[in-house]
Amino acid sequence: MAGKAWRQLVAVASLLSVLWLLPWASAIHRSDFPVSFLFGTATSSYQIEGAYLEGNKSLSNWDVFTHAPVSGRIKDGSAGDIADDHYHRYDEDVELMNSLGVNAYRFSISWARVLPEGRFGRVNPLGIEFYNKLIDSLLLKGIEPFVTLNHYDIPQELEDRYGAWLSAEIQRDFGHFADVCFAAFGDRVKYWTTFNEPNVAVLTGYMLGTYPPARCSPPFGSCAGGDSDAEPYVTTHNVVLSHATAVEIYKRKYQSKQKGLIGIVMYTTWYEPLTDTPEDRLAAERALAFSVPWFVDPIVYGDYPPEMRQVLGSRLPTFSPEERRKLGYKLDFIGINHYTTLYARDCMFSSGCPLGQGTQHALAAVTGERNGVPIGPPTGRPMFYVVPDGIEKMVTYIMRRYNNLPMFVTENGYPDGGEAGHDHAKDLLHDQGRIQYLDGYLTKVAKAIRDGADVRGYFVWSLMDNFEWLYGYTLRYGLYYVDYQTLERKPKSSALWYKRFLQSFQHEAQ
Ligand code: NOJ
């Protein structure tokens, strides 16, 4: 009797443990999205490739930054020297994607691998060969390559020669890099983006000084050089015009033959007013305008956002007639990287705002809590809360501001993990938090689409755990767990969940 009861108990327990994996246990299905929708996973070169000295690659700004003898830059003191060793294991990684059933993969090209000395040297055939092999291997499995030209990493050479984004010279270099990539890969790549999160690269690199080239001034930080009040605007100008240079080359030389699309990817935080007052509501609007429209308004409308001009006046550069002509090539879609929502409060009329936040120039301060209550369940990363409504609001905001230009959710994902060296593989593999997060956010993307938003794809960040910038290997976003001792990849529960989700279309169609 006791044996039978025990067996029944075990059967019920194991049924319950798999229940959440079944497609019908979730409210969201593949068939809630258009048939042509791209579902993929995302990564970037520095975060996964490793092989930092192989195949004639030169040093990138991130190689130099992580190796500099400055303590405390990266939480666990690590670097991307080996990362996931994707450079050698790309075939295995394509197979991981294939087993998930995705139809797209978003990755970036290491500029220093393709053009080790930028436009001052030759194209590196080994760099071209690596990405050719990757692209061919994806296409063989029916996976669409969705390629980012620049995901933070640039050849250090450009930094040393002329100060990279601080100089207008970078526009020529970026144009040359883009041209080389369109010529080499454009016969097979139909989705291009010029930049990944330039709004993050500029704020961290030139206002907060936490990413390379680590430039800033007080109260944002005490860096060896920099001017946090001026340089973010100079570098943004050069990024926006570099985007325009690459898009002009694509549209004039390649698009009609290659029939691809080209866009830009922005980091998007949704902001809720901390209190229901006109001041905080305006602060939330300013915080937004100083983030996404800062780059996208010039590309779509030819000038910086009025919300920024009002506050910054002549600190914002102006576009010359020739620059405006170039901006006329615009873009074909907007990529949205979205993770979290924060509260914004006014600093224009109220005092007591903290100094040195990234939203300071917008005269707004951000916080994750209202009266001590977090805006959503917290995660393994500070200031990162689970707020699924935020993605719907963000998509709707972009849809309205840019007249429903096509959009892709180019990143969405959930961090877990903990302190360096305290890696509980078992817990990390059973990642219920990630499943709930993805399920909740996807549900809201589907709702935005039902309400008219032209969203055409969704990419989970990330395919596998990888080098998470300032957090090194301590934060994990992957659907696949990576054992950094052996580099073995193991599917987490969320990988199985994504796979089932992607199959839920076929089930219902039968
Ligand atoms: C944004 C970045 O594009 C990516 O590089 C980063 O790892 C994820 N978000 C998570 O922070």
Image (cartoon, rainbow, N blue to C red):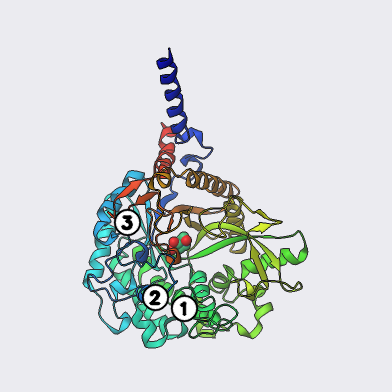
- Local crowd size for mark 3, using a 10 Å CA cut-off: few (<14), some (14–19), many (≥20): some
Q: Amino acid at mark 3?
A: Tyr
Kindly indicate the quadrant of the structure image that contains residue 172: bottom left
Q: Secondary structure at mark 1?
A: loop
Residue 84 as seen in the image, left or right of residue 319: left
| Marks 1 and 2, how far apart at CA | 8 Å
Q: Label 2 neighbourhood size at 10 Å, few (<14), some (14-19), many (20+)? A: some
Seen from the viewer's position, the closer of residues 97 and 224 is 224
With 256 as the anchor, is 285 left or right in this view? right
Contact between marks 3 and 2 (CB within 8 A): the answer is no
Per the image, the residue denoted by label 1 is 214
The quarter in which the C terminus is drawn is: top left
Give the CA distance from mark 1 to mark 3: 28 Å
Give the CA separation, mark 3 to mark 2: 21 Å
Horizontal and vertical percent position of residue 453: 57, 53
Identify the mark nearer the N-term, 3 or 2. Answer: 2
Residue picked out by circle 3: 484
Dots 1, 2 in contact, CB < 8 A: yes
Q: Quadrant of ligand 1?
A: bottom left
Tell me the residue at 48%/35% (across/down): 20
Q: Amino acid at mark 2?
A: Phe
The residue depicted at 31 percent of the width and 59 percent of the height is 84
Residue, far bottom: 162
Mark 2 — residue? Answer: 65
Compared to residue 154, the image places residue 407 above or below, namely above
